[in-house]
């Protein structure tokens, strides 16, 4: 059977094992997050639910804007030096990544503080909400080196630790929201619940990564000289800048949806959109850990020039993720409205259903080819990923400016799906072409006589 062949593939099995730890945590945290969403929605109403989404996304977007996606850099270059046995340079890469991320996090918090009044006025439509934006912005300081820490833990297969931390974080948040719900609290109590959980998770990741670094490189790993990286300084900087640009463009493409809707429309429509996002999370549930678990494996295959293994891993991953997503999407399309009523107990949430249907198309493609961006990064093509994001961003902005003022939150759902279809298609085509080219070049090299190959 096809499924048996896929699972018996050692690379696929290792990815599934590692993503399984994350999935176990993701399954629990997704269920808990759904409960959080339901209780917060019932407590705050559609408009208040929308304001909550705007505040949390505001801090997240600014943090990502200042971020250099150090987790991806750590996985690629710590992985490269680890595979070649250069432990000192591997430690230096992690140290450099952590220092850059700390600086970026401090800058991000400063931006949150400065821009909070504008966020309250133009996004929440309430100047009195400035304090809420600043309070939740404290999460940026808690995440000082969380990306670098996550990358290190991923490369060394410490997925179980990450899973446990995710569960603890989610349960803490749920407990505080339950207390707020039972006591009739408001948006401040819910924000503090989210903030507390995120702080616990971020600090836990940092501690776990520092312990892992000490285990791998000794207690004095942090003394590794950054001068060791001078020969690769331009390459490292280029990779970091490209991933930062790519991440910043992704903020416009898909990570700032609630802010667009709230700016052009109102908190009520933002609440509809946030509800649709909460429901569509059921489609992402088992797929969301796969990019994290797949990227280190892809980086290893590129380092080893095992193109057949890489192709097999990508093909098997798409079959599993796409098959699951198709089944769940059909179920949500048929039962979406009853599910919304069951969860939120109010008919005022039902306008989220049309947005849900539109999103399902985009997420079906995005989930099937979840590996599109990790494959480009593993192949050393962050610049191409950035160029794709530039193109998608231009189209996304044009679509948002035309559709959002006219048809509201449904326009945002349409443009989200369009951006997925275009960006994923271009990335997949380039990855497949590059793997085919390198595989053919390797085969040609092996065919040459020994003397000719050496020459």
Image (cartoon, rainbow, N blue to C red):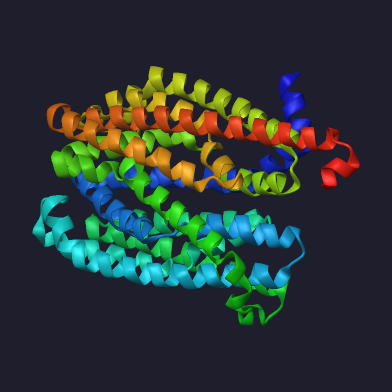
Does 293 appear above or below 147? Answer: above
Q: Kindly indicate the quadrant of the structure image that contains residue 1.
A: top right
Relative depth, front residue between 91 and 166: 91
| 320 left or right of 398 in image | right
Q: Position of residue 38 (x, y in %)?
A: 34, 42
Q: Residue at x 64, y 49 (%)?
A: 296
Does 335 appear above or below 423? Answer: above
Q: Position of residue 358 (x, y in %)?
A: 33, 24
Q: Position of residue 53 (x, y in %)?
A: 27, 48
Q: Residue at x 36, y 62 (%)?
A: 195
Q: Determine if residue 117 is in view.
A: yes
Please, which residue is most extreme toward the right here?
A: 450
How many numbered discs, if any? Answer: 0
| 169 left or right of 357 in image | right
Relative depth, front residue between 341 and 290: 290
Q: Residue at x 57, y 72 (%)?
A: 95
Q: Determine if residue 182 is in view.
A: no
Relative depth, front residue between 70 and 232: 232
| 182 left or right of 144 in image | left
Q: Position of residue 123 (x, y in %)?
A: 16, 50
Q: Residue at x 30, y 45 (%)?
A: 256
């Amino acid at each position: 059977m096809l499924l048996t062949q896929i699972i018996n593939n050692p690379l696929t099995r290792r990815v599934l094992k590692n993503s399984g730890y994350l999935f176990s945590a993701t399954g629990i945290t997704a269920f808990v997050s759904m409960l959080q969403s339901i209780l917060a929605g019932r407590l705050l109403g559609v408009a208040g639910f929308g304001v909550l989404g705007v505040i949390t996304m505001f801090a997240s977007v600014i943090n990502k804007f200042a971020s250099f996606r150090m987790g991806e850099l750590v996985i690629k270059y710590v992985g490269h030096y680890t595979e070649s046995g250069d432990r000192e340079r591997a430690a230096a890469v992690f140290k450099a990544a952590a220092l850059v991320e700390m600086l970026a996090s401090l800058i991000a918090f400063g931006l949150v503080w400065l821009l909070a009044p504008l966020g309250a006025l133009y996004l929440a439509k309430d100047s009195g909400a400035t304090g809420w934006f600043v309070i939740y912005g404290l999460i940026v300081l808690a995440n000082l080196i969380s990306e670098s820490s996550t990358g290190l833990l991923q490369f060394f297969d410490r997925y179980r630790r990450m899973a446990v931390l995710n569960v603890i974080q989610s349960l803490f948040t749920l407990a505080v929201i339950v207390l707020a719900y039972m006591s009739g609290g408001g948006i401040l109590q819910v924000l503090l619940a989210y903030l507390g959980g995120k702080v616990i998770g971020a600090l836990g990741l940092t501690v776990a990564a520092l312990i892992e670094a000490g285990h791998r490189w000794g207690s004095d790993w942090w003394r590794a000289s950054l001068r060791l990286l001078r020969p690769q300084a331009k390459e490292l900087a280029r990779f970091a800048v490209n991933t930062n640009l790519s991440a910043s463009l992704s903020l416009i493409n898909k990570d700032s949806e609630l802010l667009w809707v709230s700016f052009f429309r109102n908190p009520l429509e933002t609440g509809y959109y946030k509800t649709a996002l909460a429901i569509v999370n059921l489609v992402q549930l088992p797929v969301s850990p796969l990019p994290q678990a797949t990227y280190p494996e892809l980086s290893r295959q590129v380092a080893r020039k095992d193109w057949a293994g890489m192709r097999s891993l990508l093909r098997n991953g798409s079959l599993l993720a796409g098959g699951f997503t198709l089944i769940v999407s059909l179920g949500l399309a048929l039962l979406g409205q009853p599910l919304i009523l069951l969860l939120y107990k109010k008919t005022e949430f039902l306008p989220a259903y049309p947005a849900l249907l539109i999103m399902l198309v985009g997420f079906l493609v995005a989930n099937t080819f979840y590996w599109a961006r990790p494959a480009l990064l593993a192949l050393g093509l962050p610049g191409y990923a950035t160029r794709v994001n530039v193109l998608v961003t231009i189209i996304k902005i044009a679509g948002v400016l035309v559709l959002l003022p006219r048809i509201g939150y449904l326009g945002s759902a349409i443009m989200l799906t369009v951006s997925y279809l275009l960006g994923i298609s271009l990335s997949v085509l380039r990855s497949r072409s590059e793997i085919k080219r390198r595989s053919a070049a390797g085969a040609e090299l092996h065919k040459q006589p020994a003397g000719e190959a050496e020459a």
